[in-house]
Image: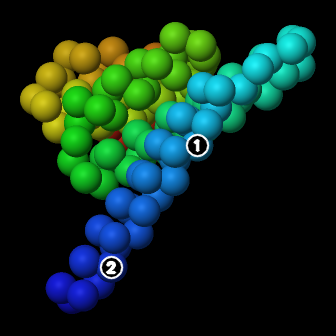
Amino acid sequence: MRETNFTNTVIWFQQLQKYSFALKILSFVLLCNDEDKSVFSSVAMSLNLNLGACYVKERNFDKVGQLCSAVLCYDTSNVKAYFRRAVEALEQNKPDLAFMDLSQAIKIDSNNKEFQQKTQ
C-alpha cells in the first residue's frame, strides 16, 4: 500500500510540473487573431483546471481556489471550476462559500447528482 501511495504522489507531482510548464510556455505565445485568442483561452483554462485537480490531491486548497477563480474570470459557466472551488471551501471550513459555488454549479448543470449531494 505504501508503494502505491508513493507512486501516486510521484505521478501527481509530475503532472503538476507538466501543467505548470505548459502554462509558462503559453505566456510566450503571440496572439495574432481572435481564433488564436479563443484557442489560447481554452488551453489556458484546461491547464488551470488540471492544475487545480493536482492541488486537490496535494491538499493545497489555497492554490485550488486561486486557479478556479482565474478560470471563472474568463468562463462564468465552468461547472468544474465551481465544483473544485466548492471542495476547496469545504476543506477550509467555509461552508457558505461552498454552498454559493455549488448552487451556481447546479444552476448551470441541474442534472448533476454529485453537485446535489454536496449541498445536502
The mark tally for this picture is: 2
For the residues carrying marks 1 and 2, which lies nearer the camera in this image? 1
Going by the numbered disc 2, the residue's amino acid type is Thr
Q: Could you tell whether 10 is left or right of 108 in the image? A: left
Colour pattern: rainbow
On the rendered image, what quadrant is the C terminus found in? top left
Image x and y of residue 62, in percent: 23, 30
Residue bearing mark 1:
22
Crowd class of label 1 (few under 14; some 14 to 19; many from 20; radius 10 Å): some
Q: Could you tell whether 77 is left or right of 6 in the image? A: right
Identified at 51% across, 53% down, the residue is 18
Going by the numbered disc 1, the residue's amino acid type is Ala
Q: Toward the viewer: 96 or 27?
A: 27
First along the sequence among labels 1 and 2: 2
Image x and y of residue 108, in percent: 58, 21
**Is residue 120 something one can see in this rendering?**
no
Residue bearing mark 2:
7
